Each structure stands twice: as structure tokens, then as C-alpha cells.
Amino acid sequence: MAEKTRYSDAELEEFRAIIKEKLELAQRDYVQLKRSIMNLDGNDTDDTSPTYKVLEEGANTLSKEETARLAQRQLKFIQGLQAALVRVENKTYGVCRETGKLIPAERLRAVPHATLSIEAKNDGKK
């Protein structure tokens, strides 16, 4: 029997559902991170005592930088998920970009935006 070269339409639909669910959660988290950066969540220091304001602002700056990094990572994750949806549409989803073989379904369920098999990913680290 020939080796499978692509996932069936039913399998692709399963992956599409997984990706859409993760995408929705990721977008919600990204919006929350952006709101936090822009102080739209109401947790600002406008009503704190001047004595603590300098310390608060320093911690706030550090927190905003970390939040900005998290937001950037989240955006990259969202873009990866969106690209995965395009691959589902093109019926190329789940094909390793290095080896051309199918990425195991278990890996795709855990990391739905994966474009490399574990084998190819490990080869790239050597």
C-alpha cells in the first residue's frame, strides 16, 4: 500500500476545527494584552499616592515591556494559525516543508501550526 501523501478532507475538517478554536482563543488573549498595554483595563496608577507613584511607574514600564513581548509572541502565533488555515484550504496542511512527508496527526493536534515533522525539526538543530 502506498504511503499517504495528504490528509483526507474529513481529517482536514478536524484540523480546521482545532485551528479555529485555538485561533479564537489566541485572538482574545491578544486583544486583552493590547488593552493591558494601552491601560484600557483600568488598572492604572492615576489614583495612587505620590510616594509610591515612582515605584509603580517603574514596575509598570517593566510590566508593559513584558506584556508587549507577550503580545508580539501571541501575534506570531495567530499568524501561524492563519497560515495553517490557508494550508487546510489548499489541502497541503500537515505536509512537512522539509521532508514532504505527512506530519503525524498527534503532533498537529498538539501544535496545529507546525510545518515541520519532529524528525525535520531535530535535524535542523544539529
Image (tube, rainbow, N blue to C red):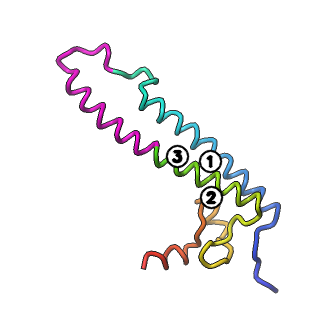
Residue 22 numbered mark, or none: 1
Q: Which stretch appears magenta?
A: 45-71
> In the picture, which quadrant includes the N terminus?
bottom right
Q: Residue at x 63, y 41 (%)?
A: 24
Task: Name the foreground residue: 59 vs 75.
Answer: 75
Mark 3 vs mark 2, CA separation in Å: 15 Å
Measured from the top left, where is residue 57 in percent x and y?
26, 27
- Crowding around mark 2 (Cα neighbors within 10 Å: few <14, some 14 to 19, many 20+) is many
Which secondary structure is most common in the magenta stretch?
helix
The amino acid type, in three-letter code, at marker 1 is: Lys
Q: CA distance from mark 3 to mark 1?
A: 13 Å
Reply yes or no: does residue 68 show up in magenta.
yes
Task: Count residues near mark 1 (Cα–Cα under 10 Å), then give few for <14, some for 14-19, many for 20+.
Answer: some
In the displayed structure, 53 sits above or below 121; it is: above
Q: CA distance from mark 2 to mark 1?
A: 9 Å
Q: Is residue 3 left or right of residue 126?
A: right
The amino acid beneath tag 2 is Pro
| Pointer 2 residue | 112
Horizontal side of residue 18 vs 69, given as left or right: right
> Mark 2 near mark 1, Cβ–Cβ under 8 Å?
yes
Residue bearing the label numbered 3: 75
Reading the chain from its start, which is encountered first: label 3 or label 1? 1
| In this view, 76 is above or below 25 | below
Residue 42 image point, x, y percent? 42, 20
Counting every numbered tag in the picture gives 3
Callout in the foreground (3, 1): 3
Q: Quadrant of residue 28?
A: top right
Please tell me which of labels 2 and 1 falls first in the chain. Answer: 1
Q: Secondary structure at mark 2?
A: loop
Instruction: Give me the residue at 20% from left, 21% from top.
Output: 52
